[in-house]
Amino acid sequence: MSQEINNNPNQNNEEADLIRLLNYFKNGIKSVFRKLWMLVEFVIQFIILLKKNWILVVLMAVLGAIYGQFIRPYVAGGVGLKKYEMLVKTTSITNFELYAFADEVNNQKSDDSNTKSEGVILAKELGITKMDVEAVEQISDIVNNYHEQNEISTLRGFETDTLFYQAFDLKDFKSNMEKTDYTLQKVKIKVDNDIAPQAIQERFLNYVNNLKGVKREQESKLNSLLVLEKEIKRNLNNIDTLLQAKATASKNSGPAGADQLLVNTASRGNVEADLLRYAEGFTKRLYGTQRMIADSQQGAKIISNLRPVGDDSAISNPIVKYTLAGFILACLIIVGIQFNKYLDRFPNRN
């Protein structure tokens, strides 16, 4: 009995602590709901305030709609903001210039200083107010970049540890690719001018392809590809010469069928079959090299012409945008009036 009596004080203390903890959580929850209800009351009071001044709210909203539908196009000369998109095929160096040009356009200033770059001047002349560039990810670009790294490491020979490149995983390689590594880029521009899209496209393409960095990279790559093409053609000519000499020698020496040219000889290894296999490999390399030469000679090229596109956002509609602006302005006026009344009552309260 005495032991039970001695344990009662500790038990009572634990129960009291538990009750205090529960009361703490209960008061906290009540405080949160009280704050939320205060916010709801504030919103309701604001709605009641708008209802009392509904004439002002409706009037400002209507004026905003009228301005967006009729007055603004007249003030802007009937041009308005137009949105265009086009798809271009470029190189990595051209992509760097393309993204840099977009940054210049988006950060251009309204002053007329003489320190403006050619890109900003061109954007002003064409009426380009905003430009966005978006990489179009293709599996072919990922594979080409992946194999290009392996081929470069092979050409370096003993100077590069090829085991590092052989350990490349295609999925990991894709995660390390930059947006400038993709050949297809979607260009989105907003124009505040009445210039024809074809004229904008031609001047834009001419500007990009004639940048010094782009021209140097194009000439360097083209010269390297021409040397490679010449070497591949020389190898093909040498193979043709050897095959022709072998066929002539076989015809003029020995009995018929003693030495013949075999084309499909999967089970027999001879010089002719090896030369034909090499010729097939060189032919494929020549085809790929000539494709790259054609791409290098053209520089950045248009895949999909510059076309007008609609803006999906509802806020871009001038009627909706300026109606909303009128509503916000009416709310600010009402809040200003109420604040002025509060300032009039403040001295009396003190």
Image (tube, rainbow, N blue to C red):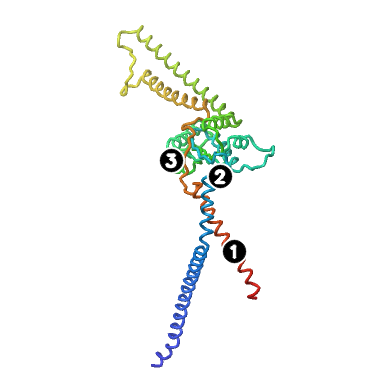
Q: Secondary structure at mark 3?
A: helix
**Residue 220, position as x, y percentages in the image:** 57, 27
Q: Residues within 10 Å of mark 1 (few under 14, many from 20)?
A: few
**Residue at (51% x, 57% y) in the render:** 58
- Name the residue tied to disc 3: 170
Residue 338's place in the image compared with 193, above or below, is below
Q: Residues within 10 Å of mark 3 (few under 14, many from 20)?
A: some
Numbered-mark total: 3
Q: Nearer the viewer, mark 1 or mark 3?
A: 1
Q: Kindly report the distance in space between the C-alpha atoms of the residues bearing marks 3 and 2.
A: 53 Å
Q: Kindly report the distance in space between the C-alpha atoms of the residues bearing marks 1 and 3.
A: 65 Å
Residue 37's place in the image compared with 204, above or below, is below
**Residue at (53% x, 62% y) in the render:** 53
Look at label 3 and name its amino acid.
Leu
Label at residue 85: none
In front of the other: 8 or 52: 52
